[in-house]
Amino acid sequence: MSFHDEIRRTDWSEIEREIETRTETDVEYALGAVRTGGVSLNHFLSLLSPAAESSLEEMAGEAHLITQQRFGRTITLFAPLYVSNFCSNSCAYCGFNSRNPVRRLALTPEQVREEGEFIHRLGFRHVLLVSGEAPQVVSLDYFVRITGLLRPLFSSIAVEIYPMDVDRYGALIASGVDGLTVFQETYSEALYKEFHLGGKKRDYRWRLETPDRAGQAGFRRIGLGALLGLGNWRVEGFYLGLHTKYLMRKFWKSQVSVSFPRLRPAAGSFQPPRPVSDLNFVQLLTALRLFLPDTGFTLSTREPADFRDYLIPLGVTSLSAGSRTDPGGYTHPQANEAEAQFEIADRRPPETVVEVIRQKGYEPVWKDWDEAFLGKNL
Amino acid sequence: MLKGVWMDEPLMIAGRAFRSRLLMGTGKFSSPDLMKKAIEASGAEIVTVALRRVELENPRDSILSAIDTGRYLLLPNTSGARDAGEAVRLARLARAAGCEPWIKLEVTPDPRYLLPDPVETLKAAEILIKDGFIVLPYIHADPILAKRLEDIGVATVMPLGSPIGSNRGIRTRDAIEIIIEGANVPVVVDAGLGAPSHAAEALEMGAAAVLVNTAIAVARDPERMAAAFKKGVEAGREAFLAGLGAQRKEAAPSSPLTGFLR
């Protein structure tokens, strides 16, 4: 039994129709349920619906209160560390697409340590290792080795790399990795096939069951996400909520979090077929918050500075800042940015982001984990 | 009148005396400065800090540098630990970094409701007490577990009123009454207190103290709310001493068949 079995019991177009036909009365009922503490899957559909757009301010108010009570007035900070842009996949939207003629680079362990030290000096204690899918270049052994080098610098090390099997995940955890992030990109199998044109990533089911394998292996933190702009965001949001609840039930000791990567229309690059507006984005974020009061929400520097700032009180709990998405980009910023995975919209240095967090009345949190949890150092 | 019996005494934990019966948590504040002001206003003398949140070896750590350890007992907690092994490791790291050997033991394998695991908590408490720690365990309001922990030498028991951060007040009232009735160590109601009236209720029931965090940290004015909790705690304690304690339920022996023998 995996989430694949769960998702097969639903039908994308049926869910879509259901969401589109919800009325303002349905939304009122859903908001009533928010206040009495029980948003069901049925209510969640209403909150994602076009009919809920006129209740956005109210949803935002509730999302603010719920987040504040559960997470306090704090925002956790992390930095991504891109170790390699080699990739055997051909994802239509991605800068690492194997068919893109960009220079490929995989950092040596020593270069990873240098990048890690730079990030540490910026203040970060939570780091996210990112790579493309190229096990022959960045192997399991490679990740075990660099995790060992980074351990003295960070209290939390998470990975966002190509999917592996349970045994390999076990080895990563044993080496000191506590979290895994994997985006499904789209929950629609048909759309998934359309955008993933080559490489192992074409396998929808292997991708969809990755968080299951992560849970079985015992990752403490599992991060999900749908790439916003590929399919109908309302339906993606529904499946994202369903997936999160499923994982929380099944792997009850793991913390599940959700990211909101959005494809932004830009000249000369991939044009998202179903762009998600700022208003849509806020509805998705707040609807998910009302459905998932205990789930951490992460926002990357893909989003522009002012938009990120506005979202801080609406349910976000974790931000990256000062990110580079090209391997080696922190210590060698002169490198060609065409090799980056996506274009960064918020280019402010971490200290500026931290200042804004404070101005908004929140405490920036650099450390909210301890290596003692994974049995290191004893 | 047995004046001495009803005189208030300081709260004694592991041989150390505290005037305040309000313990404060340090999470969820919007800034270290606000946290500092709230602690000050609360009158608390014991302040708990999640080890996962602080860098013990860093003198500029934002939380630690805001707490004057000359004035407050810094009580490290093992928040986030999923089993006994993790909690024990965290506690030992804290002591190795120079903290006093006091530890608020939290083993909460479920990240949603953060409910304490009774089996792992007991296991960890045993190890830590043998190791020389003064252990203050966070538990569900389970009277037998409280006794078992007391038997192995914990300094307090800290039953929850309702899940951490829920602000729902004392939903476990009946079980906490039984714990208080049987306890030989201070009973500190630890979680879920959302208003000063909840704190007052705990003290009225005979709890030795309460620990509060979310209700203060997330209030519009945390400093003012901390002062309100201070008053709530004091009012509850006074009410308990003034006689409400006498209302505690006693087991009523009912023996209709042998009543004629009396």
Image (spheres, grey):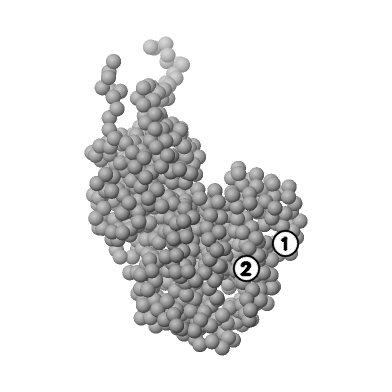
In what quadrant of the picture does the N terminus of chain A appear?
Answer: bottom right
Q: Is residue A241 visible?
A: no
Residue A16: image tag: 1
Q: Tell me which residue sits at (38%, 56%) in the image.
A: B53
* Residue in the picture at 42% in, 11% down: B260
Give me the chain letter of mark 1: A
Secondary structure of residue under mark 1: helix
Residue A21 in view (yes/no): yes
Residue that carries the numbered disc 2 in the rendered image = A228
**Judging from the image, what secondary structure is the residue with disc 2 in?**
loop
Give the amino acid at mark 2.
Answer: Leu
* Amino acid at the residue labelled 1: Glu
Q: Nearer the viewer, residue A176 or B41?
A: B41
B17 with respect to A101 (left or right): left
**Mark found first going from the N terminus, 1 or 2:** 1
- Vertical order, A110 against B215 (above or below): below
Note whether A246 is above or below A101 in the view shown: above
User: Which percent across, then down, holds residue B147?
Assistant: 35, 38
Q: Nearer the viewer, residue B4 or B214?
A: B214
Q: Are marks 1 and 2 in contact (CB under 8 Å)?
A: no
Label 1 Cα crowd, 10 Å radius (few <14 / some 14-19 / many 20+):
some
User: Considering depth in this image, is B51 or A375 the residue closer to the camera?
Assistant: B51
Report the side of A348 relative to A29 (left or right): left
Q: Kindly identify which numbered label has been placed on residue A326.
A: none
Q: Position of residue A96 (x, y in %)?
A: 55, 81
